[in-house]
């Protein structure tokens, strides 16, 4: 399959159009070459080159300013909507000092050492998942394979009891629209509120349980921090647990799914990885670069910016960072950036962001994907994806992933 950029026409940045969702990369190339600081009809500044994307994420003159930015887009009433109110407490949307305080409460659970210790558990879940389908001869790589691992691991970390988990395995993966740079419709806001309130209700009950019978898990830790007084409020606690649950699974499901699709579209790379499993750690970085499961993040200018790629940006403006585009910028990856190459040297994808919000779960996601993909190649070496040319993508832009990916062996 030729992944080289094809000429495309139409608007430069229309991220929810089916064509963009199917293959955003030719659109990114146009943005990088024709209009690297592009302004959308909603007045957002879109950065697509590696140099600006990485600067905006790391520079203190850019922040989140969530309430102000969201109110400007939707009007002052929006913060009465439960889902937006809850998001305003996410560490992902917070600026220092709140960000520093909230991140500090959970960061220890995600250190490289803690995550390394999870390898045997991750391997056990992957093996059980394959055991459950191996005699069938076919499965959906998303639903039957990629989905179960990250959900189980985040449930383990949060301390969600085994008997409550079935509802999480069955829950929909429709929350992703919240992150897209195109405003939600009233109906989407209504559905998001309903999902958010259900989650709030469930977690409040679980907090009660953990106050009465503490465990060795993140929720117990945070409930104790809340009782301590000034460390975090009940609303912050609930919101950040919902964030961890969401951030911890959809993204990783899609790293595994997008990685498997990319490999099967490039049979030479698949054969190489099967023959040399020691390449897997580097291959995961290449999957992250080649087709990131998070395509974009954003910041707000906290002061006037004199010169971003030659453009002056007033204070209070939204700047979008196209991570997926920066990852294929030939200025950083001169050797055919549109090619999947599991032996590529110096791959440092921006897929986990940068600066103070750098993904808390980066190492966990890498290890989950490494064990999942390595085990699948080893245990089902004849696996074939039914339709590599036209897989069905989910209709969201920021979270890039497949609806399903049927495969047989
Ligand atoms: C392939 C998988 C993943 C990708 C591509 C990814 C991507 C990202 C990105 C781009 C950011 C930063 C956004 C920004 O700068 O505005 C972020 C932040 C975050 N991620 Fe991930 N993520 C992944 C997996 C995970 C996992 C497994 C967890 C937790 C279990 C997690 C938890 C978080 C949290 C809590 C933040 C907010 C950190 C902060 O604001 O300080 N992520 N992630």
Image (cartoon, rainbow, N blue to C red):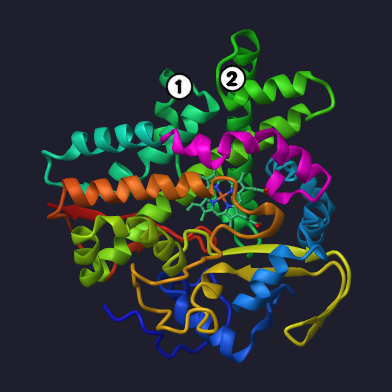
* Residue contact between numbered discs 1 and 2, judged by CB atoms under 8 Å: yes
Query: Residue 220: image x %, image y %?
Result: 62, 20
Which quarter of the rendered picture does the N terminus lie within? bottom left
Dot 2, how many residues are within 10 Å of its Cα: few (below 14), some (14-19), or many (20+)? some
Give the residue at mark 2.
206
The boundaries of the magenta stretch are: 91-118
Task: Establish if 145 lies above or below 407.
Answer: above
Q: Indicate left or right for 182 with 277 as reference.
A: right
Residue located 53% across and 87% down the image: 30
| In-front residue for pair 307/386 | 307
Query: Residue 4: image x %, image y %?
Result: 37, 84
Give the residue at mark 1.
164
Mark 1 and mark 2: Cα distance apart in space: 10 Å
Task: Establish if 298 lies above or below 380.
Answer: below
Task: Establish if 350 lies above or below 148.
Answer: below
Query: Residue 177: image x %, image y %?
Result: 56, 55
Numbered disc 2: secondary structure = helix
Residue 197: in magenta span: no
Q: Indicate left or right for 168 with 184 as reference.
A: left
| In-front residue for pair 280/182 | 280
**For residue 110, which numbered disc appears in the image?**
none
């Amino acid at each position: 399959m030729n992944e080289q950029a094809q000429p495309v026409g139409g608007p430069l940045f229309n991220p929810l159009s089916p064509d963009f969702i199917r293959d955003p990369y030719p659109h990114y190339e146009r943005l990088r070459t024709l209009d690297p600081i592009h302004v959308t009809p909603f007045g957002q500044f879109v950065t697509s080159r590696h140099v600006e994307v990485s600067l905006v994420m790391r520079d203190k003159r850019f922040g989140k300013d969530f309430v102000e930015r969201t109110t400007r887009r939707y009007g002052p009433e929006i913060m009465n909507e439960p889902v937006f109110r809850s998001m305003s407490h996410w560490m992902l949307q917070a600026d220092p000092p709140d960000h520093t305080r909230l991140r500090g409460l959970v960061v220890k659970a995600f250190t490289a050492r803690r995550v390394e210790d999870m390898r045997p558990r991750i391997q056990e879940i992957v093996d059980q998942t394959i055991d459950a389908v191996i005699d069938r001869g076919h499965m959906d790589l998303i639903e039957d394979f990629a989905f179960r691992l990250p959900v189980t691991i985040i449930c383990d970390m949060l301390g969600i009891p085994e008997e409550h988990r079935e509802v999480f395995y069955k829950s929909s993966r429709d929350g992703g629209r919240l992150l897209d740079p195109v405003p939600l419709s009233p109906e989407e806001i209504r559905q998001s509120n309903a999902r958010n309130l259900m989650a709030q209700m469930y977690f409040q009950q679980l907090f009660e349980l953990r106050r009465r019978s503490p465990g060795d898990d993140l929720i117990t830790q945070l409930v104790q921090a809340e009782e301590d007084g000034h460390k975090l409020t009940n609303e912050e606690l609930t919101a950040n647990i919902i964030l961890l649950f969401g951030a911890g699974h959809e993204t990783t499901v899609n790293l595994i799914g997008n990685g498997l699709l990319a490999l099967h579209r490039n049979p030479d790379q698949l054969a190489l990885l099967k023959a040399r499993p020691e390449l897997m750690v580097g291959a995961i970085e290449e999957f992250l670069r080649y087709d990131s499961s998070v395509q974009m993040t954003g910041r707000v200018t906290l002061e006037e910016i004199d010169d971003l790629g030659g453009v002056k940006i007033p204070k209070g403006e939204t700047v979008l960072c196209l991570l997926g585009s920066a990852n294929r910028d030939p200025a950083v990856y001169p050797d055919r950036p549109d090619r999947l190459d599991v032996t590529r040297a110096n791959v440092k994808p921006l897929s986990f962001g940068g600066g103070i919000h750098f993904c808390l779960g980066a190492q966990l996601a890498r290890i989950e994907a490494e064990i999942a993909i390595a085990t699948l190649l080893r245990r089902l070496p004849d696996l074939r994806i039914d339709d590599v040319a036209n897989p069905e993508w989910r209709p969201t832009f920021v979270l890039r992933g497949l609806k399903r990916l049927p495969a047989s062996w």
